[in-house]
Amino acid sequence: MKKRRLLLPATGLLLICVATLAMRPPDDAKNDKPVVVRGLLRDIACPIQNKQSTSRAFNRKCAEDCAKRGSPLAILTDNGTMYMTISESMPDMDQHEKLVPYVGKYVEASGIVYERNGMHSIVIKQIKEDKSVALKDDLE
């Protein structure tokens, strides 16, 4: 018995390629329009290691201590996405000093967002505290 080979017309193959590319997330895509990210500005270690820690319930003293010791900072959103803070220059410039006053506060940050392989980052252009969000900051 002869094996049959399925041959697709060139347009069919092209459509499959286009559809496959369209389904892929925009890896390493840059959005030139400012995006607003809302969440808790804090160190990155605790929310990764401590499942009880969220964008509205956390240990403020621990977050502040970690930040003072130089832990990288990120914005933890309500849906659990963490946006690492980066500069727009290459090589990256430290954002720590500028952001420490916002550690442990729920913020609204406007800036350029980058995503790559599940990692999220933001170049913050403007940041302000959102005092309308109630925080529980005494978790153990």
Image (spheres, rainbow, N blue to C red):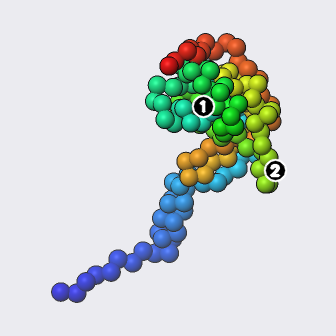
Judging by the rendered image, the residue that carries numbered circle 2 is 89
Residue 76: give its label.
1
118 displayed left or right of 32: left
Q: Residue at left 55%, top 15%?
A: 138
Q: Are marks 2 and 1 in contact (CB under 8 Å)?
A: no
Which of the 4 image quadrants contains residue 134? Answer: top right
Q: At which x and y percent is residue 15? A: 51, 64
Q: Residue at left 66%, top 25%?
A: 64
The numbered mark, 2 or 1, whose residue comes first in the sequence reads 1
Q: Amino acid at mark 2?
A: Ser
Q: Residues within 10 Å of mark 2 (few under 14, many from 20)?
A: few
Callout 1: helix, strand or loop? strand
Q: Is residue 112 visible?
A: no
Q: Residues within 10 Å of mark 1 (few under 14, many from 20)?
A: many
Q: Amino acid at mark 1?
A: Leu
34 displayed left or right of 56: right
Q: Quadrant of the N terminus?
A: bottom left
Q: Is residue 117 above or below residue 111?
A: below
Q: At which x and y percent is residue 20? A: 50, 60
Q: CA distance from mark 2 to mark 1?
A: 23 Å
Q: Residue at left 56%, top 36%?
A: 45
Q: At which x and y percent is residue 74? A: 65, 35
